[in-house]
Amino acid sequence: MSAGENLHRPTDAEREAVARLCSVTVNADEFSGYVDVLRDPKNSPIPHMQVERQQRSDCQGNALANGEEYRTWYCSGRRLMPQLSEMYAYNCSEYLMQPSQVGRDQGTSINSGVRVLQNGAEDLGVPGGLPLESVWPYSRYCRNASQFRAACNGLEVETPHVTEVGDMPESFDDMLAAVAAGATGHIGTKWGVSWQTVPGSSKRLMDKMPTSGGGHATEILWAVELNGVWYLVVWNSHGDGYYLMSRRCYDQLTKAKWEPFGGYLLTPDRMVERYDRITQGGGYF
């Protein structure tokens, strides 16, 4: 199994912990003009996102940071795109799963990442959120829980721009509206993908739900229209920027309830209010 295909299935305890956080649903009807928002190139985060190439089994940490970077950019009125620490996201996810997991580099779970943003390392006095990459660089991988605890002493994290969590929308159109309104899908899929292509695009297309291979975490954070058909933009950490996901694949994953790895919608709070304010040209920190 290669690096990037070491995603853990959540334990029952992790499922319960995140289920207690879920409180939000998205209805496309609440977000007037979301298709026009997605069609306007100035609203796209794609040119501003960093292309990631993971060096460990830290796909979940990469996905988590990518989603939070997009939400911060959106909530700033599309002005501020931070570089957040993927390695802290990974190390902290290991710690939340089990302190003895720190340093094993065996991957983490989607659920542990959600808890990093929502709760942080509470027993260490670190709130939810991620530090800047400049504060916790990618090269700082703590090899055990003691190192991680020491590194967290006095650590400053950026206030997260995800304060609500929900199940992934059942409707593809609701997911389109969600990304237009600053939300992301923090997802895990199997990685034995039968890649397809879309005429006019150099990006790989996941057109069917993968059913084999190890697990991989990625982040749904935008959508594009190609030849009159909508595709979700899913940020990856294999040096390719992003891949595309079709409506058919999304529907299959939804029907399977995103098993076995899980998927959650991470949203800014007051989504409709923020959306109305930002689409009128302002930020909303």
Image (cartoon, rainbow, N blue to C red):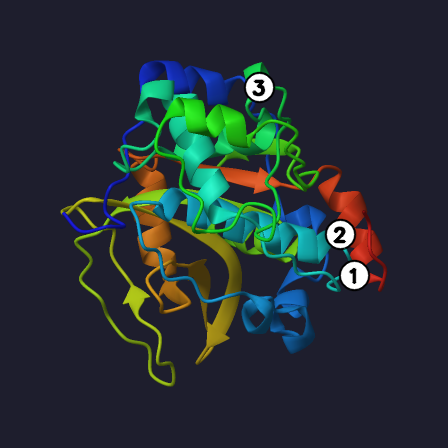
Is tag 1's residue or tag 3's residue first in the polypeptide sequence?
3
**Mark 3 and mark 2: Cα distance apart in space:** 35 Å
Mark identifier at residue 279: 1
Q: Check disc 1 and report its element: helix, strand or loop.
A: helix
Give amino acid for label 2.
Answer: Tyr
Answer yes or no: do the residues labelled 1 and 2 have beta carbons within 8 Å?
Answer: yes
Between 285 and 22, the one lying in front of the other is: 285
Q: Where in the figure is residue 215, as x and y percent of width and height? A: 24, 43
Q: Quadrant of residue 203?
A: bottom left
Q: Where in the figure is residue 107, as x and y percent of width and height? A: 30, 37
* As drawn, 94 above or below 82: above
Query: What residue is rendered at 38% in x and 29% in y?
Result: 94
Query: What residue is rendered at 32% in x and 62% in y?
Result: 238
Q: Check disc 2 and report its element: helix, strand or loop.
A: helix
Is tag 3's residue or tag 2's residue first in the polypeptide sequence?
3
Give amino acid for label 1.
Answer: Thr
Q: Where in the figure is residue 71, as x and y percent of width and height? A: 64, 51
Between 62 and 272, the one lying in front of the other is: 62
